[in-house]
């Protein structure tokens, strides 16, 4: 799913998933015809589920009536980046899927006179955490609604990001699974390596990685060795202390891989880590001259003398995100922040939440703030 030369003009498709009940609505054929014309006028194509190309990279799903089928189809395809739910019923499972899918923007559409589906539209809208999600509540008017929906879809396509699942090989034999999030037209973009906690995997970064890519910063959400998809040589829970310390090398391996990508500036890297991932991230990044910024979340990491020198030099900006209820972690992060002489360094403290991914759930403005910080510091 890497953008090729001229990717901005690559055709995009809208996959329709509907029920026979929707097609039986008297004014439905006229509305569908209007929407298809509006989509074509903006450079897209409206196709059925069976007509979706197997190698599609740029797709939007629109569900007519059958919201559950549309939500499940979108959740199962990495090519889908936006979802329209038109006069749909939604089960509690579908609402849960929407709340878990942080990559997909959702537009819910309902007629205020249809009380049950209005409730479903509101539930679906409130479940989505994507910044571009929206809700349209209005009478069913083909002449007005078709352009509105087509324009929303076109906006999502124009601001789209690329997501590619990759495997990174380390010098000592590990095969690391990762998701690479790229701005759609990336050329020499800076990149951030995202390091999860010892209790999670790369999926905790879906929303943050998307926000970074939307701001012009590539993001590599990494399963470090022994976690997630990166278990070809063992599991982290079985590691010795020496093996755990070697996780820091995964940051360097990620940097080396990113440097091979034409979309990325090989001398302009950063890392973000949570808890144990923050320690490993700092150990790998602060010893590498390609590092421009480090974000440490709810970490216990104590800097070694060489890392203190890097921060005191001001060459690397540091963002420290702390949960004050954990006094040991927040105290360590305050000291790290005080060590830095870079004018872009910043300390953010929260009274609620202990681990970084908990802070994401409790403070929905935190991930956008982190993405903004990286974009500013990396001059994206």
Image (tube, rainbow, N blue to C red):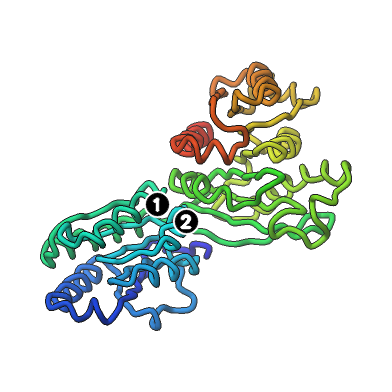
Asked which quadrant contains residue 333, the reply is top right
Q: Dot 1 surroundings within 10 Å: few (below 14), some, or many (20 or more)? A: many
Residue 85 image position (x, y, % from top left): 31, 64
Residue 91 image position (x, y, % from top left): 39, 64
Please tell me whether mark 2 sits on a helix, a strand or a loop.
Answer: loop
Q: Earlier in the sequence, mark 2 or mark 1?
A: 2
Q: Residue at x 59, y 62 (%)?
A: 165
In the depicted view, which residue is nearer to us: 349 or 150? Answer: 349
Residue 159 image position (x, y, % from top left): 37, 53
Disc 1 marks which residue?
Answer: 128
Q: Are marks 2 and 1 in contact (CB under 8 Å)?
A: yes
Disc 2 marks which residue?
Answer: 101
Residue 161 image position (x, y, % from top left): 45, 55
Up/down of 343 relative to 207, above or below? above
Please tell me whether mark 1 sits on a helix, a strand or a loop.
Answer: loop
Up/down of 265 relative to 65, above or below? above
Task: From the viewer's perspective, tell me whether residue 224 is left or right of residue 356.
Answer: right
């Amino acid at each position: 799913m890497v953008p090729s030369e001229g990717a901005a003009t690559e055709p995009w498709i809208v996959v329709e998933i509907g029920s026979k009940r929707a097609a039986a609505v008297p004014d439905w054929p006229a509305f569908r015809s209007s929407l298809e014309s509006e989509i074509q006028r903006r450079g897209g194509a409206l196709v059925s589920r069976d007509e979706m190309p197997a190698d599609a990279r740029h797709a939007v799903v629109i569900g007519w009536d059958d919201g559950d089928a549309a939500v499940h189809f979108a959740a199962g395809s990495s090519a889908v980046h936006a979802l329209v739910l038109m006069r749909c019923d939604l089960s509690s499972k579908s609402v849960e899927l929407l709340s878990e899918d942080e990559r997909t923007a959702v537009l819910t559409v309902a007629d205020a006179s249809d009380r049950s589906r209005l409730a479903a539209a509101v539930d679906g809208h409130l479940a989505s955490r994507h910044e571009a999600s929206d809700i349209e509540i209005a009478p069913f008017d083909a002449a007005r609604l078709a352009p509105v929906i087509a324009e929303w879809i076109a906006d999502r396509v124009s601001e789209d990001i690329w997501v590619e699942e990759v495997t990174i090989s380390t010098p000592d034999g590990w095969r690391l699974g990762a998701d690479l999030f790229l701005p759609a037209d990336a050329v020499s973009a800076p990149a951030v390596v995202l390091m999860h906690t010892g209790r999670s995997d790369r999926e905790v970064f879906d929303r943050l990685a998307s926000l970074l890519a939307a701001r012009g910063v590539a993001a590599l959400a990494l399963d470090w060795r022994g976690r997630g998809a990166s278990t070809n040589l063992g599991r982290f829970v079985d590691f010795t202390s020496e093996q755990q310390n070697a996780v820091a090398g995964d940051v360097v391996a990620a940097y080396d891989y990113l440097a091979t990508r034409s979309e990325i500036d090989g001398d302009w890297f950063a890392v973000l880590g949570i808890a144990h991932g923050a320690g490993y991230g700092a150990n790998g990044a602060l010893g590498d001259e390609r590092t421009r910024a480090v974000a440490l979340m709810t970490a216990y990491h104590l800097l070694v003398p060489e890392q203190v020198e890097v921060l005191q030099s001001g060459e690397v900006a540091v963002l420290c995100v702390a949960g004050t209820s954990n006094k040991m972690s927040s105290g360590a992060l305050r000291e790290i922040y005080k060590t830095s002489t870079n004018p872009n360094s910043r300390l953010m403290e929260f009274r609620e939440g202990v681990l970084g991914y908990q802070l994401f759930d409790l403070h929905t403005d935190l991930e956008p703030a982190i993405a903004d910080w990286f974009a500013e510091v990396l001059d994206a």
